[in-house]
Every structure is written in structure tokens, then in C-alpha cells.
Amino acid sequence: MRNQFLTLVLLLTAVFAWAQDESMEMKPEMTEIWDPEVPIITPGESPSDAPSDAIVLFDGVDLGREWTNADGKEPGWLVEDGCVTVVTGEGMIKTKRVFNDFQLHIEWRTPAEVKGESQGRGNSGIFLQELYEVQVLDNYNNRTYRNGQAGSLYKQHAPLVNACKPPGVWQVYDILYTAPRFKDDGTYFTPPTVTVLHNGVLVQNHVKLRGPTEYIGIPEYSVVPHGAKSLVLQDHGNPVSYRNIWIREL
């Protein structure tokens, strides 16, 4: 963000200098910004692989290195076969690190054995900054309310399309998140915004949130203004699995 702002300032400075001297001929190099140089990273071999500047939050083996139970204890979810699976009753897990703006890659799988319907089928969730939920749900031939299905910003924004794969098949969310900024009175100066790609398909296009996720009632901002907070994965009573979780701070 700082580099983008600096680039804009330098460009405007060049244009302003030209405008002040009508005798000066505008040349291509007058709008070319060379410094600071764009940082170089090494991308992953595939879109699912973590780039060199990412933080790997779960590598398929060691959950406790980056995660804890919401109550601060060791996470009680099952780590097996390169993934971590919700253990009913163990509660939510959260990252030890906290984040503001980020790019998140996370893969999830609902149970192959279908049980339940609507919200009772393969239900979990990814809470951005502990407050704003991207819904995880098995919505393959399973209808529920549109603003509560997979890919929704729960109870706020329905996904543009249903891009779900069948139960038991790994699915991917790539999430771009911009944290809120606050006025002195505690209200939003800019609200949180979210973009979500589900299995490579755009399902949320830079949507603005009204406030934290609410199960009952209209979501309005009602908590103390916050800074960086954790990523949270929800125990909703279904054995949903996660793997290949990485994040880039923006």
C-alpha cells in the first residue's frame, strides 16, 4: 500500500511540474517510475502452492506450531493424512499470529458420507479477523438460504454462483481481505472488504461488510474497534477437513 501511494505521488509530481511549464514538452520518461523497484518473489509451482513471501499456516503435519484452541489450549482437531479435521466438541481453532490485510489460500473438504441437509450438512466457517465469516458448507445438490450457503459472507452477501464440488472432494478458497479502518467515534471510516474465488470462480467481488457476522439480527458494527486479529476455523459439529493453508500479508 505504501509503495502504491509513493508511486502515485511521484507520478503526480511529474505531471504537476509539466503543467507549471507550458513550454516543456511532455515525454514518455516523465511518467516512468523506476524507484522503489517492485519486490521480487518466487511464485509457487501451481496456484495452490505457497509463494516465497507467504506464511504457511498448516503444512499437513504440525498444527500446534501456528494454531491454538480458541481457549488458548493445544488444538484438539485430528491431524491425519496431510489434513486437519474438525473434532466435534473441541471448539474453534485460531492462529497464534494476527493479521490485517491479507491474501489467504485454504483448501477444504466436506464428508464423503452425506448426512443432514441445508445447514446441517458439512458446515464449518472461516472467520477473518475472528469476526467476519466466509461460509463453508456442502451445497452440492443441497439447497439452503442463499446468504448462508458456501461462498457466502454469512448472512450478508450471497455468492454470485454456486461453485461447489461433490462431497468428499477437495475445494479451494482464495480470499483477498482488506481490514476495516475506524473513525474516532468507533464507526467505520472504511468497512472491511472481501473478494472470494471458490474453485477458481469469482463468487464475491470486493464486497463491503456492514459489520461482524451475526446469526440473529441485522449485522451492524457493535464491538470495540480493532486492529490485527487471528484467523479462526469453526467447529460446527461436522467433520470438515482443511489443508494447504497459507497467507500473504498485504
Image: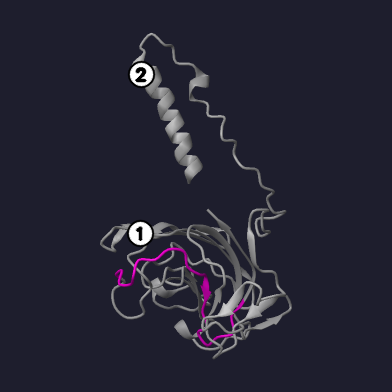
Where is residue 97, by image quadrant?
bottom right
What residue appears at the point 58 percent right and 70 percent down from the top-left corner? 165
x, y percentage for residue 10? 46, 30
Residue 118 in view (yes/no): no
Residue 232 in view (yes/no): yes
Q: Are the residues tagged 2 and 1 within 8 Å (C-beta)?
A: no
Residue at the left extreme of this rendering: 185
What residue appears at the point 53 percent right and 29 percent down from the top-left corner? 33
Which residue does the numbered mark 2 point to in the structure image?
19
Where is residue 94, by image quadrant?
bottom right
> Taken as a whole, is the magenta stretch helix, strand or loop?
loop
Of residues 61 and 198, which is closer to you in this image? 61
Residue 164 inside the magenta-drawn segment: no
x, y percentage for residue 86? 59, 83
Q: For the residue marked with disc 1, what is the amino acid?
A: Pro
What residue appears at the point 28 percent right and 59 percent down from the top-left corner? 184
Q: Is residue 57 left or right of residue 89?
A: right
Residue at the top extreme of this rendering: 23
Dot 2: what SS?
A: helix
Dot 1: what SS?
A: loop
Mark 2 vs mark 1, CA separation in Å: 36 Å
Q: For the residue marked with disc 2, what is the amino acid?
A: Ala
Residue at the front extreme of this rendering: 184
Which residue does the numbered mark 1 point to in the structure image?
191
- Which residues lie in the magenta part? 220-241
Bin the neighbour count of mark 1 within 10 Å (Cα to Cα): few under 14, some 14-19, many 20 and up.
some
